[in-house]
Amino acid sequence: MTTTPNAAAQQPAPVGINDDVERPQSRKATTRGIAAATVGNALEWFDMGIYALLAIYIGRNFFPAENPAVELIQAFAVFGASYLIRPLGGLILGSYADRKGLKKGLMLTIRLMVIGTAMIAFMPGYDQIGMLAPIGIILARLVQGFSAGGEFGAATSFLIAQDSKRKGFLGSFQFASQGLGSLMAAIFVAVLTSVLSASDMTEWGWRIPFIFGLLVGPAGYFIRKHVDEAPIVRSDDDAGASGSPILDVFKTQKLGIFIAAGALAISTAVNFILQYMPTYGIKQLGLDPSASFSCLVITGVILTFGTPVVGHLSDKFGRLRIMIPTVILTALMVIPLFLWLTAGRSFLVLATTMTILGCLKAAYFGALPSVMSDAFDARSRATGLSFSYNASVAAFGGFTPMIAAYLIEITGQGVAPAYYLAILACLSLAALGAGLKYRGIR
């Protein structure tokens, strides 16, 4: 293996989770790297949050039906369907980033995001072009899903490469940017629903946030174009391990896929439940739309600013020492929280429930990106991260709002989504245990 200067006398480190070496980075370069890696992710989650929050209005425009519940389920079904293509996007775009460079991968994903966002922003409604309208929305969501498939792996790999001694803190910006995107989406929708009438929101108001997203995209592309490539020096063993990062992941790193995807399961489900909660408040609790959407501002602030704090603490005290107690607490609390929510039926109860879930999520996923990255070797890390992330999001995230709405519809119980979350918490706990036992993740 190659060695760093002044280290010729040292024994070579075994190939594994620490088989890459980071060049020293200045604080300014690290800051630019964080901005470049997170801007696209923030845009992705802004668009995703906007779609979920405005699903009621999107359903009326593109999936008209006699039953409003059917409109909503169909809109959420398209929301979830876009996640089915994400694992494919993760493999193709993640492999591209591993082979051509993380910077090139990040530039490609943000271009595709802008295309998908533009399609949704300017797509005519069902009453104008008939069935072409829902087909167009589906295609737009598939483009966004394919793009987002490669975003996580490339961006996370880019972040942790800035400084191996601060992987928890730097990796946390991956999810902090998700909180920022969700926060921006919540503010947009809360403001729009308070100043526009229901008819204006249905007719044209829902398009405004998507048009705003088009303004963010070019700025993100410019930042990524002018940032330095990730400072990774690969070992000779890494370089010759496989000609294909995709083949390498499935031949030698299947356990890494389980650890990364399983650990993410509860985190992504809670995130999508938070996105669904304002709709839950409107449909199930009869709350005012602007009041319901404003609750997401609270959780957005928690996730944006609390996540890096947890990431910093994980570098000092250990990542699993924070994550394992948090996931156990989540499993124990979700059912009582939903029982309280369905009994209380007030804005205060909804806001408190979402605040508690937001704090649990921030505590859990602050260190999660670095834990997921340590499940894979450096030679194919972007591919492994992208596939495992998107496979987990497709299975446990994208369809969560639809599953929640469906479970409530067929059971008649407002607490039904909590059972789903409790099961996923147990799955994530098992994945963290495997990471500790078999990969030495701490």
Image (cartoon, helix red, strand yellow):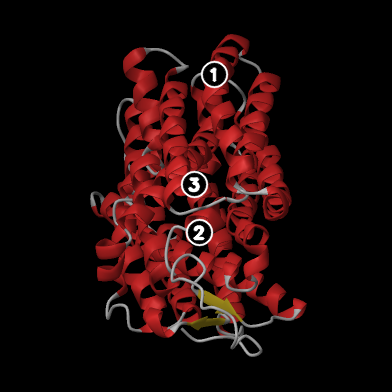
Quote the CA–CA distance across marks 2 and 1: 28 Å
Q: Earlier in the sequence, mark 3 or mark 1?
A: 1
Q: Residues within 10 Å of mark 2 (few under 14, many from 20)?
A: many
Give the residue at mark 3.
436
Ranked by sequence position, the earlier of labels 2 and 1 is: 2
Residue 189 in the figure: left or right of residue 437: right
Q: Nearer the viewer, mark 2 or mark 1?
A: 1
Q: Which residue is mark 1?
A: 338
Q: Residue furthest top?
A: 343
Residue 172's tag is none
Task: Reply above or below: 396 against 103.
Answer: above
Task: Name the kind of residue labelled 2 in the image.
Answer: Glu
Residue 410 lies, in percent from the top left, at: 31, 17
Residue closer to the observer: 290 or 233: 233
- Dot 2 lies on which element? helix
48, above or below 386, in the image: above
Viewer-nearest of discs 3 and 1: 3
Q: Residue furthest right?
A: 27
Residue to which mark 2 is pinned = 44
The percent coordinates of residue 293 (x first, y second) are 62, 36
Q: Residue at x 63, y 38 (%)?
A: 296
User: Alpha carbon of mark 3 to alpha carbon of mark 1: how far?
Assistant: 31 Å
Q: Amino acid at mark 3?
A: Leu
SS assignment at label 1: helix
In the image, what residue type sits under mark 1? Phe
Q: Is residue 274 above or below residue 319?
A: above
In this picture, is 271 found above or below 213? above
Closest to the camera, between mark 2 and mark 3, is 3
